[in-house]
Image (cartoon, grey):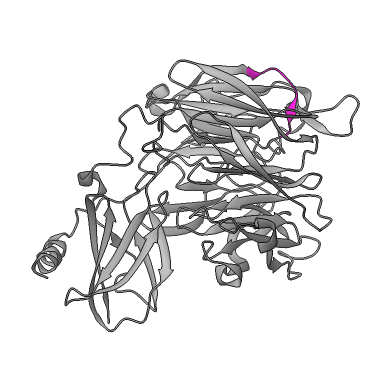
Amino acid sequence: MKQFLITVILLVAIVKHQAYCQGMNNIWQHGYSTYATLPWNGTQMNLFNGDTSIVYHERKMPFNFTLANISDSSGNMLFYSNGISVANKMDSIMVNGDSLNPSANTTAWIDDGMPIPQGNIIIPFPNKPNQYLLFHETFVWHKTLPWSVAPELFYSKIDMSLDSGRGALIQKNMFVINDSIIFGEMVACKHANGRDWWLMNHDFNNDVFYKTLITLDTMITYSQHIGPVRTFFSGFCNFSLDGNKFACVNPDQDLDIYDFDRCSGDLSNRIHIPIADSSVWRTLCFSPDNSKLYVISLLYAYQYDLTAANIASTLDTIAVWDGFYSPQQPLAAVFNIPYIGYDGRVYVNCANSTFHLHRIEFPDKLGDSCMFTQHNILCPTYNGFTSPNHPNYHLGPLVGSPCDTLNLTPGPSPKERGVVRVIPNPIKGNILNIEYPVIKNKNNSLKIFDAQGNNVYIRTLPMWSGMHDFPVPNLSPGLYMIQIIDGENRSYGKFCIF
């Protein structure tokens, strides 16, 4: 009780010294081609200091499906790419940032951006703070089969210390895989040592996954035979945020779920789940707490419970397209790509150029409790298919694993963690929206105490996010304290209810 009162007094004294949590995926860009006279390009979602805003940000670069962008650790935009060129934070082409993926098809899409879902991704170069690796690909039509393929996989290296901090490409269009691979479906996961990276691709017309290990001074590609022979190009893959699961889905081979070993990069324990609809396009993402899997199938949104013994039996149709058009026919706001927000929600864009996004409000909950809300987010411009392809930059070492050999801490020091921020404060209704220090690779325990020091609420927070909102039980007017516990470390905040 005495400790609690002292803490409250200290928190009241804190006015300006707040350690706001930002991150490399704090800015999400959306858009479409720039040649139209209507507002086609420029929607941007910003997540700063706990506030989520959707704004118009004019830029020259057109976007289609292909988008990778990255911010610095404070949440400020560094650069982005549509698979054809790289733009810096000033929205101008970066030095040496043109002419990615040299091919006739790249040239043909120059006014739109590349049309490859998960067709590029950005990874910080291990232990080189100013350098980044952009992985990217183009596509061609297969000579004998009626499918598009990526004829090779490239990388380009970017040094942000050049051009007065605007960055420049110091290497461009370097081969990673000189073989035909599946169109798109490129994702990455932090190695179990917390420093290196695994990059995942799939061979075309084969049962081979390519796994590229990116270390301080090497880039080695391994292969593994597992799962079906894959040719279909309307698919999507993703890792769970803790890196322990990997899943792929497409209209031909349906859904496959694997265990992933962050040390070896090996996939195992394949679970295959048929999907009984006729959609020509499917995507997926995991819930923030890694316990649910969402499969999006144009007209339907499905949820699976990954904690169940029989995952397939837990299929729950959580949404069916309600017939909404944006702004009018034929621009149907059907479901497209889901991605996890910094605020703990799942955002779903549309498979047409529309002014709206969908959102899953509580993706960690089962069934209808997850609240799939259709077209509830209005954008200032058309958004055509675009969503960012971000790995979980916040994932730390797998503590206690054979690969946890670098003595990296799973998160920032207690001093860097600062305090917990509640927005708004006093709170309105029973929804508590907090910003808290990101703890890498470890779940946080949140407790709420009343003014008498009684513990009135407790829950687990996502380990990857610095923002979260959730309903709290009916609390009487008064002052409350929040405590976030991470091992021996503590972070505190306060809020009022009037």
Assign the N terminus to one quadrant of the image: bottom left
Quadrant where the C terminus is found in the figure: bottom left
Q: Position of residue 186 (x, y in %)?
A: 63, 35
Extent of the magenta region: 176-183
The answer to whether residue 5 shows anywhere in this view is yes
Q: Is residue 178 a member of the stretch shown in magenta?
A: yes
Seen in the image, is 78 located left or right of residue 154? left
Q: Which residue in the rendered view is the most extreme toward the right?
A: 144
Q: Nearer the viewer, residue 61 or 318?
A: 318
Residue 182 falls within the magenta-colored stretch: yes
Total residue callouts: 0
Q: Along the line of sight, which residue is nearer the eye, 100 or 118?
A: 118
Where is residue 102 drawn, in percent x and y? 70, 20
Lateral position of residue 201 relative to residue 242, left or right: right
Residue at 45% from the left image edge and 27% from the top image edge: 196
**Residue 64 seen in render:** no
Seen as rendered, the residue at the extreme bottom is 476
Question: Above or below — where is 445 with respect to 213?
Answer: below
The image quarter containing residue 182 is top right
Q: Position of residue 274 (x, y in %)?
A: 77, 52
Residue 267: name its quadrant.
top right
Q: Residue at x 75, y 23 (%)?
A: 180
Q: Can you give x and y, in whole percent of width and height, for residue 2 in the image? A: 8, 68
Q: Nearer the viewer, residue 162 or 211?
A: 211
**Which residue ends up furthest to the front in the rendered image?**
309
